[in-house]
Image (cartoon, helix red, strand yellow):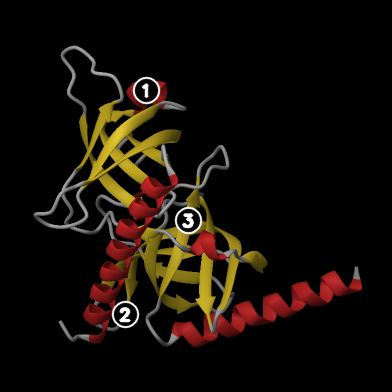
């Protein structure tokens, strides 16, 4: 028990040291909203703007389409921090949403997260998911495995992507998407502008609404062969790395 308590105290100390270090760097955090059923929703990559006197965290929360649109007062979240090679996560909740003053002239939309608790180590895979809702990407084509008369599928917006699955927003209400749970469909992911789309099969594992009540899907890839799985993972990882390089260049102001 004492060893567990000491480990917890060390993690807590490391967490707040990381927050202090990142607060002055305008650094993005990985924020994962949790649905009322306890399901993890597509994560948002949001800038840490401030830490308040009571250890609440203020993060930039752009309005509009994307994972951040569900961050409203009362929504539970998981907060991930990667600092100095250490990956940590903690529980929090949105307590306020509205403009935050960066200075006397500039105000940005933001959300305030109550003091994070239950700090623990995070596995590497928990921190590997690329938010894509803010990117200008071609729609993801979703079609049934077996042709359906008078139906040629949907064009979905990609919310996030990992080598294990993808989050999608469909142009339909949640009620129409519920029958997709546990069904496998065909996806065509356009990861290279002008190139051939990555064609994979994926199974819908959860459905939840966005801020406007439209259906969002959490999908897990399913592969028929190991060579197919590795080929898809290479394509996704190359796309993710390129997007991260672009973001780094943007932050540094180098193009």
Q: Is residue 204 left or right of residue 239?
A: right
- Residue at 34% across / 59% down in the picture? 234
Camera-nearest label, 3 or 2: 3
The kind of secondary structure element at disc 1 is helix
Q: Residue furthest right?
A: 1
Q: Please report whichever mark, 3 or 2, sits nearer to the chain's N-terminal start.
A: 3
Q: Dot 3 surroundings within 10 Å: few (below 14), some, or many (20 or more)?
A: many
Q: CB of mark 1 within 8 Å of CB of mark 3?
A: no
Q: Between residues 235 and 165, which one lies in front from this camera angle?
A: 235
User: Mark 2 or mark 1: which comes first in sequence?
Assistant: 2
* Residue 66 visible here: yes
How far from the left and from the top, in percent, is residue 237? 35, 62
Compared across the picture, whether 128 is left or right of 67 comes to right
**Helix or strand or loop: what does disc 3 sit on?**
strand
* Residue in the foreground of this view, choosing between 172 and 55: 172
Which is more N-terminal, label 3 or label 1? 3
Inspect this view and state whether residue 161 appears. no
Distance from the alpha carbon under mark 1 to that under mark 3: 23 Å
Circle 3/circle 2 CB separation < 8 Å:
no
Q: Residue at x 28, y 38 (%)?
A: 187
* Residue occupied by mark 1: 175
Query: Which label belongs to residue 32?
Result: 3
Quarter that holds the C terminus: bottom left
- Which numbered circle lies on residue 102? 2
Q: Quadrant of residue 6?
A: bottom right
122 relative to 228, above or below:
below
Front residue of 98/5: it is: 5
Question: Which of the labelled discs sits on residue 233, or is there none?
Answer: none
């Amino acid at each position: 028990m004492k060893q567990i308590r000491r480990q917890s105290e060390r993690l807590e100390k490391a967490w707040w040291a990381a927050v202090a270090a990142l607060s002055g760097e305008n650094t993005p955090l990985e924020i994962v909203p949790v649905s009322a059923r306890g399901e993890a929703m597509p994560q948002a990559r949001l800038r840490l703007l401030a830490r308040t006197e009571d250890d609440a965290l203020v993060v930039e929360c752009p309005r509009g389409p994307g994972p951040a649109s569900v961050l409203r007062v009362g929504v539970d979240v998981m907060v991930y921090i990667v600092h100095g090679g250490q990956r940590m996560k903690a529980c929090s909740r949105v307590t306020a949403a509205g403009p935050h003053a960066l200075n006397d002239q500039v105000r940005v939309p933001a959300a305030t997260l109550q003091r994070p608790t239950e700090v623990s180590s995070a596995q590497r895979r928990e921190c590997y998911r690329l938010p894509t809702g803010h990117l200008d990407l071609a729609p993801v084509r979703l079609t049934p495995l077996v042709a359906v008369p008078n139906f040629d599928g949907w064009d979905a917006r990609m919310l996030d992507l990992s080598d294990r699955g993808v989050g999608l927003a469909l142009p339909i209400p949640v009620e129409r998407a519920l029958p997709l749970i546990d069904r496998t469909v065909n996806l065509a992911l356009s990861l290279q502008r002008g190139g051939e789309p990555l064609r994979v099969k994926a199974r819908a594992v959860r459905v939840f609404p966005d801020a406007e009540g439209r259906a969002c899907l959490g999908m897990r890839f399913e592969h028929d062969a190991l060579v197919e799985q590795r080929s898809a993972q290479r394509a996704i990882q190359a796309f993710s790395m390129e997007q991260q390089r672009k973001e780094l260049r943007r932050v540094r102001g180098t193009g």
